[in-house]
Image: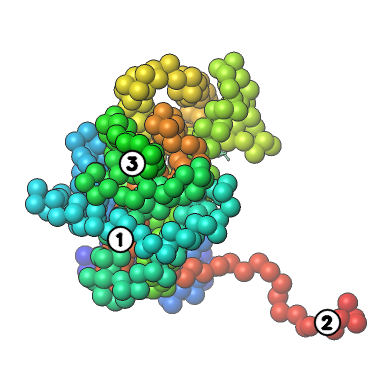
Amino acid sequence: MADNQKTYTLTNDETGVSVKLPVRESIQGPPAIDVSALYKEAGVFTYDPGFMSTASCKSKITFIQGEVGILEYRGYPIEQLAANGDFLETAYLLLNGELPNEGQLRDFNQLINRHTMLNETLTHFFDGFHYNAHPMAIMVGVVGSLSAFYHDSLDINDPELRRVAAHRLIAKMPTIAAASYKHNVGEPFMYPRNELSYCANLLHMMFATPCEEYEVDPVAEKALNLLFILHADHEQNASTSTVRLAGSSLANPFACIAAGIASLWGPAHGGANEAVLDMLSEIGDVSQIDKYIAKAKDKDDGFRLMGFGHRVYKKYDPRAGIIREVCHEVLEKLADANNPMFELAQRLEEIALNDEYFIERKLYPNVDFYSGIIYRALGIPNNMFTVMFAIARTVGWVAHWLEMMDDPRQKIGRPRQIYKGYARRDYVPLSDR
Ligand code: CMC
């Protein structure tokens, strides 16, 4: 250990034996005690269910300071990216660390556009799903199946091929997502149109039919672009950590992203956007809010206020603030200004934020609270909300996977446990049990 290395000392109160643990500094945010040698030196593990106090890796991609509501991608505040940026520009930033210049952005757009089509055989895969399969179930299966089609980008030891796989994933997610929607509604799949922007192309593939011309509404395209920027990354959340853990065994990137999609689907994570709209429909009317607030506070009732609370944010989620503002604008432009769901959501937020239970626990609206209201105004059905989240988050997932694969310290992720089962005992023959 270097002389000026900051340390923490851990002492066994029974034996008096101490170990010095080095401190790893962050550029911003709290430092971390490096416990990687603790078991070797002291014969004990650390125990931290839910990773409440554990940093699982070093990363240069995204910074969050939850106590004050700060979110930055590669150092740029989310508010600035949301106000000025474009989704693929943000994707370039997250993947490469710098904002692209004009030429780099043009090339990146072309690169992604060139990979939007699916292998035609893969489109038959959808026939195996029942017509009413949840689109997230289709996403998990079809994205995982990409590894059976794109063998030429599966060599994870080749940094160039890792990039090709990353670009394929970003490019093909909207095509797969739109196809899962079309499968649900029984309409023919639409091929991508590469002259359209990333978000316009997605809207085209979802809502165009071969029967008539379809023009993408610029209001919808702009709103989707903004939501995708806000969802693109969020450091070591559950799905990103899932992608990293799957990738740590050197699994192929398509399989890793399928694992990330599965993790995102849960209602405590990305599935919350769908759950919020289900909750608002169930509440139905402002007069019922008090009843549901009481249910959310009742520990014997499993009900939680969906779209509220966050492991990291102990202040308003900056993404929720931006989305709430944009809700007003989008709903007005789409002539849906008196959207009853938006009114209900705003009233629910107001009541919760003035309630001692939510104040004490620092529970604020998160990114999922208002996003579904915009998606619904764009004509996107509830069961597609988490799919939208997955499309945008694919950028973060692949950025983290690339970062991990480039890290010389990367090791297979293998947590330990505190064993609480039976001590060793002898097998009892069936006749004696
Ligand atoms: N409604 C009612 N009570 C809540 C809620 C909620 N939404 N969220 C947290 N609490 C309470 C919880 O019961 C606990 O109370 P107590 O201290 O009395 O036991 C306290 O607040 C702390 O909650 P926790 O569950 O220990 O916190 P966590 O960091 O483990 O969980 C969370 C974070 C997001 C899973 C949780 O807040 C939650 O379930 N929220 C609703 C689902 C949701 O909106 N998820 C989206 C998260 S943001 C986007 C994303 O990740 O995709």
Q: Is residue 115 above or below residue 352?
A: below
Q: Earlier in the sequence, mark 3 or mark 2?
A: 3
Q: State the image quarter where residue 375 is shown.
A: top left
Q: Helix, strand or loop at disc 1?
A: helix
Instruction: Classify the position of the N terminus by image quarter.
Output: bottom left
Residue beneath label 3, please? 204
**Mark on residue 168?**
1
Q: Are marks 3 and 2 in contact (CB under 8 Å)?
A: no
Nearest the viewer among 75 and 102 is 102
Inspect the image, locate mark 2, and give the three-letter code of the amino acid beneath it.
Val
Query: Residue farthest to the right?
Result: 431
Q: Is mark 3 within 8 Å of ligand 1?
A: no
- Tag 2 secondary structure: loop
Q: Tell me the residue that label 2 is attached to.
A: 428
Residue 40, quarter of the rendered image: bottom left
Give percent across and percent down for residue 215: 29, 34
Q: Amino acid at mark 3?
A: His
**Quarter holding the C terminus?**
bottom right
Tell me which residue sits at (36%, 26%) in the image.
327
Mark 2 or mark 1: whose residue is earlier in sequence: 1
- Residue drawn at x 32%, y 57% is 117
In the image, the residue with mark 1 has its CB under 8 Å from the nearest atom of ligand 1:
no
Q: Marks 1 and 3, Cα distance to the nearest angstrom?
A: 19 Å
**Res 111 → quadrant:** bottom left
Three-letter residue code for mark 1? Arg
181 and 68: which is toward the camera: 181
Describe the element under mark 3 as helix, strand or loop: helix
Residue 266 point in image, percent of width and height: 52, 48
